[in-house]
Amino acid sequence: MSAAQTRHTEGSARPVRLPWWAVALAVVSFVALLFVMTPAAEAEAAGAPPAMTSVVHFLARLVGAGV
């Protein structure tokens, strides 16, 4: 019965390694959600704070949208 039960000690924890595409997928989805929430063309007309507008423009240039 003792063979079926294994105890995990604190030193036996395996480190978790993420593949590169998991991190890239999270970044791409975050940027896509930002674009959906605040489109660059409507952000200035809606009276968004200047800091948010500049972040959206920077991300658009970074992605290559050419805003």
Image (cartoon, helix red, strand yellow):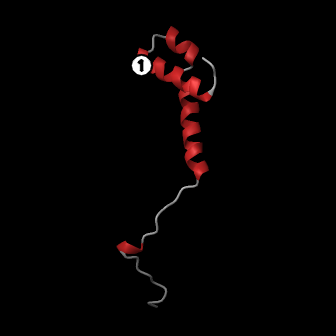
Give the residue drawn at x 58%, y 24%. Answer: 60
Residue 36 at x, y percent in the picture: 58, 26
Q: Is residue 23 above or below residue 6?
A: above
Q: Is residue 25 above or below residue 4?
A: above
Residue 6 at x, y percent in the picture: 44, 82
Neighbor class of circle 1 (other Cα within 10 Å; few <14, some 14-19, many 20+) is few
Residue 35 at x, y percent in the picture: 57, 26
- Quick check: can you spot residue 36? no
Give the residue drawn at x 57%, y 28%. Answer: 62
- Quick check: can you spot residue 66? yes
Residue 52 at x, y percent in the picture: 45, 20
Q: Secondary structure at mark 1?
A: helix
Q: Nearer the viewer, residue 6 or 13?
A: 13
Position of residue 30 in the picture relative to residue 50 (left or right): right
Q: Residue furthest top?
A: 45
Number of callouts: 1
Q: Nearer the viewer, residue 20 or 26?
A: 20
Q: Residue furthest right?
A: 65
Q: Is residue 16 above or below residue 45?
A: below
Q: Quadrant of the C terminus?
A: top right
Q: Residue furthest left?
A: 10
Residue beneath disc 1: 51
Position of residue 13 in the picture relative to residue 57 (left or right): left
Quadrant housing residue 48: top left
Quadrant housing residue 61: top right
Amino acid type shown at disc 1: Ala
Give the residue drawn at x 53%, y 20%. Answer: 57
